[in-house]
Amino acid sequence: MCNKQYDKVKTLRFGDLGDERGSLIVIEGMQAVPFEIKRVFYIYGSDATVVRGQHANRRSEFVLVNVAGSSKVRLDDGCGRQRVVELNTPNTGIYIPRMVWKDMYDFSPDSVLLVLASEHYDGSEYLRNYEEFTAQVRSQLQEEV
Ligand code: TYD
């Protein structure tokens, strides 16, 4: 396996503490998600023609949840493995470890994509060039041998 981080991608299901008054989803760091949450942001108003993300992160881990509407995320390990996950329910998220390339796209008009991150924003840990990303994956493989 070329990029072992990619094997850590997983779907997370969050419990619903709701009752007759409605749903209540709680997401706590180091419990429902496997890191302390240092940053929260959300993306909305992106339409079906927009592709966001298009980067990998050296350090940050993320959990993505479509709290309204739907979108898709394409994950790429930089050495041949790819998968597409549709996010379309507020009680399900996808955990994305560091060093996985991600594209978010196919946003529904009502999409609100919530992102939980393990790190504060630091633009220098973003890999925004795909060739640079694959080179980095290959160099980490060398280090692991
Ligand atoms: P960008 O990384 O392009 O967003 P996405 O991955 O969702 O497509 O971010 C757009 C701009 O916002 C860019 O100039 C960096 C800035 N930004 C921050 O300052 N802090 C943040 O936490 C994020 C996600 C982006």
Image (tube, rainbow, N blue to C red):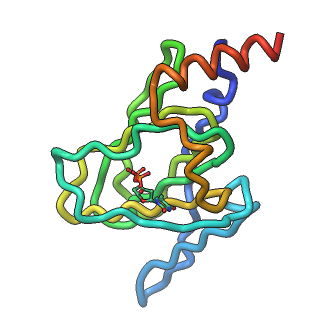
Image side of residue 63 versus residue 43, left or right: right
Between 137 and 7, the residue placed more toward the observer is 137
Q: Residue at x 68, y 44 (%)?
A: 59
Which percent across, then down, holds residue 60? 64, 48
Q: Left or right of 35: which side holds 51?
A: left
Q: Residue furthest front?
A: 124
Residue ID at (34%, 46%): 52
Q: How many marks on residues? A: 0
Q: Is residue 11 above or below residue 77?
A: below
Q: Identify the residue at image location x=63%, y=48%.
A: 61
Residue 112 x/y as whole percent = 33, 65
For ligand 1, which image quadrant applies? bottom left
Residue 47 is situated, as x and y percent measured from the top left of the image, at 18, 54
Q: Quadrant of residue 45?
A: bottom left
Query: Would you identify the image quadrant in which residue 114 lies?
Result: bottom left
Towards the viewer: 81 or 98: 98
Q: Is residue 143 left or right of residue 37?
A: right
For residue 1, above or below residue 101: above
